[in-house]
Image: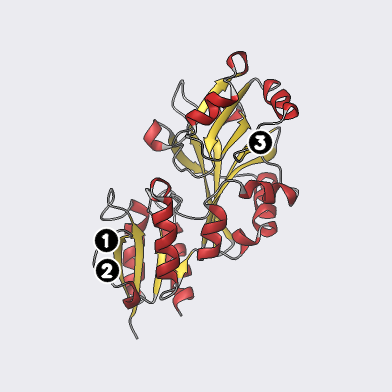
Amino acid sequence: MKKHLALITYSGLPHGAESERLMLPYLAAANIETEIVDWRSDGIDFSKFDQIVLRSCWDYHLRVTEFIGWLRRVGRITPILNAVDTVLWNHNKFYLREVEARRIEIAPTVFVDGGPIASSEWQEIRNWKKFVVKPAVSASAHQTWLFDSAAVPTENELKSKMEAQPFLIQQFIPEIETEGEISFIYIDGAYSHAVLKRPAAGDFRVQKEHGGSAELFHPDSALLDQANRIAATVPQVRDSLYCRIDAVARDRKLVLMELELIEPELFLGLAEGAAERFADAIVRRLR
């Protein structure tokens, strides 16, 4: 019997990203009828699909209340991947506290959730050469700022810049500029491939929209073992259809930057067989 699949995008990419389009022939060969659908489209009956897979819904962080409402509403009638509970857990970067509690190293972070920043935390921040400030809910380096310890803004200035929303203050890891950030892509909890992302000259953001670059990367066994440990330790990674683990290698040890479980670019076009592997994983879930 033919199955019906929705790959979710947003209005800025009505035909989806390259990674989605690369999967279409493999899905069609498995007798799966696939539509690429803007999550905000009017008149779409999501109950007609057997499965919904979030892919390039890259505006969700700008409409987070609307997006969460859509997730919960649609998730009651059609299965969504990654799972709604996983997306809700991952959409706020405060999940990093839980990850750190599992003894996974993250960039040193101060979490600011409305209350005052403690004097001990300010002391820690001032000891950092540079630090990054980002909203708790954001994507693609949206509203992400780099500061030098020689010109630390006041708490009120930071809260104003973050528009009074919860945010993170993180020590800047200089290896991002010198070595780049590694994205380890996992499909059905298993390692698929990795990509090395580098910022443009004079910038610290590795995203393409900020001038960053990405190329296929072959991690050595030591780095891959560390990434696999993260994947095995965090159930949201282990149990999900897809995840991108973003980390920086510092003195041969991975420092986790983020777990991307909502709509990460998976760079399927950079690794041979990756698009087919992802399509096969979707087929397995449908069957």
Task: Report the amino acid beneath label 3.
Answer: Thr
The quarter of the image holding the N terminus is: bottom left
Residue 210: give x, y in percent of width and height: 40, 32
Q: Residue at x 68, y 50 (%)?
A: 99
Disc sitting over residue 44 in the figure: 2
**SS label for mark 2:** loop
Q: Position of residue 195 (x, y in %)?
A: 50, 44
Residue 233, placed above or below residue 247 = below
Alpha carbon separation for disc pair 1 and 2: 6 Å
* Type of the residue with mark 1: Ser
Q: CA separation, marks 2 and 3?
A: 41 Å
Residue drawn at point x = 30 percent, y = 62 percent: 36
Q: CA distance from mark 3 to mark 1?
A: 38 Å
What crowding class fits label 1: few (fewer than 14 Cα within 10 Å), some (14-19), or many (20 or more)?
Answer: few
Q: Earlier in the sequence, mark 2 or mark 3?
A: 2
> In the rendering, at what x and y percent does residue 180 appear?
54, 33
Between 254 and 143, which is closer to the camera in this rendering?
A: 143
Are discs 1 and 2 less than 8 Å apart at CB? yes
Residue receiving disc 3? 109
